[in-house]
Image (tube, rainbow, N blue to C red):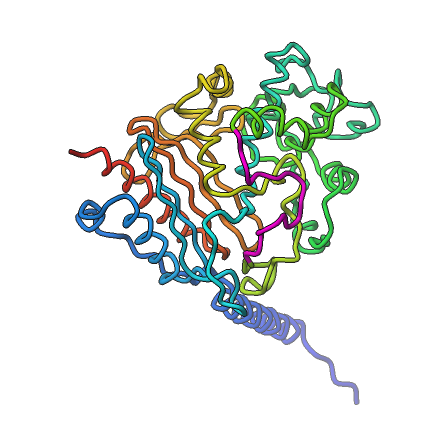
């Protein structure tokens, strides 16, 4: 006798299987999220407490609070009308527990885009490039062949993220790329070329590290110089920066261990090398970063109007969020306009903002993938320099 399973029984079995798979996937995701989400617990500092302290004590309190909230290490710099305070808290690594040197070079990640944009704008002022010329006038044809929007985008659009060129940091690269080796242009181009253009140039904005790699390549092509030498020429030498490096994995004194990876957020990320190239390749002390922001935004006569040229023709929503050349213009949590950038590589987060209304500069760095904590720190730092102006 042959037993026949009815269609209804098969359908019921399939539904049960689907529900089981969904339940297992949900439990697995919940377990992953509980382990790997941003587990820092940022706590705001009372404004009256900040107001009762001097600038040094304010910086120290913000750094201490960051470590108490979950960061293994933190650096906070506050600059107000020429007065400056730098404070550190936590340790250089979880294993060694050494005190953090305030002058240690930091992996400032995408804050590096300020430096790259400064180089490109300087070249335009010298007549070596035209920001509104298409990039195929400057780059070798094989480099941009098959690159989405590669033949129609301008240099300016690279710098304000309106190019519509796919970022090399797609999911495939994020999960399977080897982050322990320096990123090459060839590898980045392969990742970008396998994707479709998200929009036409100038149609809207979308953050793209690839655009800044191309900008750096343009600078090297038209000058026949290394990008490192251009950074030195445009910013390091004119400002007398003493702890700024480009394209170096760990310069002298750079011993901060950050914690965060693609799948294990609290693993040591010191060996990683995503901080390479014109998109993220600067390492600099907090004081050096503050000098660059001060010169470009607050006292631009030191660089003969370079910062003003970078801030021309911003795009976005005035008063809320705009992109200029290398700069982001937005408001802090307290409503003050701030100009600067943030940086993020595995294990290291940075903010760097000028606060023009109070002639202030704030720089902060933490050694963990804790974005919520960084945002609170940045707002506290802006509040601290604003209070310094209160009689």
Q: Which residue occupies 33% across, 48% down?
A: 59
Magenta: main secondary structure: loop
Side (left or right) of 363 relative to 205: left
Side (left or right) of 365 relative to 168: left
Work out whether residue 79 or residue 313 is closer to the camera in this orientation and state it: 79
Q: Quadrant of the C terminus?
A: top left
Residue with the most extreme bottom position: 1
Task: Determine which quarter of the picture holds residue 133.
Answer: top right
Work out whether residue 339 or residue 365 is closer to the camera in this orientation and state it: 365
Residue 171, compared with residue 216, is above or below; it is below
Work out whether residue 291 or residue 212 is closer to the camera in this orientation and state it: 291
Residue 15, compared with residue 76, is above or below; it is below
- Residue 215 part of the magenta-drawn span: no
Residues drawn in magenta: 240-256
Counting from the top left corner in percent of width and height, residue 155 is at 64, 20
Side (left or right) of 46 relative to 101: left
Residue 155, compared with residue 365, is above or below; it is above
Q: How many marks?
A: 0
Counting from the top left corner in percent of width and height, residue 259 is at 54, 60
Side (left or right) of 316 relative to 119: left
Q: Which residue occupies 73% across, 40% down?
A: 188
Counting from the top left corner in percent of width and height, residue 351 is at 45, 42
Q: Quadrant of the N terminus?
A: bottom right
């Amino acid at each position: 006798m042959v037993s026949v399973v009815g269609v209804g029984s098969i359908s019921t079995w399939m539904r049960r299987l689907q529900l089981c798979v969904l339940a297992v996937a949900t439990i697995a995701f919940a377990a992953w999220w509980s382990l790997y989400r941003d587990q820092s617990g940022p706590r705001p500092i009372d404004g009256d407490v900040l107001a009762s302290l001097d600038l040094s004590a304010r910086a120290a309190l913000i750094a201490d609070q960051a470590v108490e909230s979950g960061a293994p290490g933190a650096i906070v710099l506050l600059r107000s009308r020429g007065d400056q305070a730098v404070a550190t808290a936590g340790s250089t690594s979880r294993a060694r527990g050494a005190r953090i040197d305030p002058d240690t070079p930091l992996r400032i990640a995408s804050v590096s885009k300020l430096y790259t944009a400064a180089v490109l704008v300087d070249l335009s002022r010298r007549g070596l490039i035209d920001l509104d010329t298409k990039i195929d006038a400057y780059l070798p044809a094989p480099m941009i062949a098959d690159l989405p929007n590669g033949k129609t985008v301008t240099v300016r659009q690279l710098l304000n993220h309106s190019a519509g060129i796919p970022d090399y940091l797609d999911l495939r690269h994020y999960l399977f790329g080897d982050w322990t080796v320096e990123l090459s242009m060839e590898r980045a181009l392969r990742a970008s070329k396998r994707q479709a253009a998200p929009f036409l140039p100038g149609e809207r904005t979308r953050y793209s590290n690839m655009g800044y790699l191309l900008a750096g390549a343009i600078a090297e092509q038209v000058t026949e110089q290394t990008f490192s030498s251009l950074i030195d020429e445009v910013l390091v030498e004119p400002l007398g920066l003493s702890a700024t490096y480009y394209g170096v994995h760990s310069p002298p004194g750079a011993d901060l261990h950050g914690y965060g990876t693609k799948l294990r957020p609290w693993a040591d990320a010191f060996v990683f090398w995503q901080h390479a190239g014109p998109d993220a390749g600067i390492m600099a002390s907090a004081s050096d970063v503050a000098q660059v922001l001060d010169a470009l935004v607050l006292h631009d006569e030191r660089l003969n109007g370079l910062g003003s040229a970078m801030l021309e023709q911003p795009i976005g929503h005035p008063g809320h969020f705009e992109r200029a050349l290398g700069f982001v213009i937005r408001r802090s949590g307290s409503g003050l306009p701030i100009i600067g950038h943030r940086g993020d590589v595995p294990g290291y987060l940075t903010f760097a903002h000028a606060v023009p209304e109070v002639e202030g500069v704030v720089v902060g760095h933490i050694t963990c993938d804790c974005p919520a904590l960084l945002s609170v720190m940045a707002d506290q730092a802006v509040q601290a320099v604003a209070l310094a102006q209160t009689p």
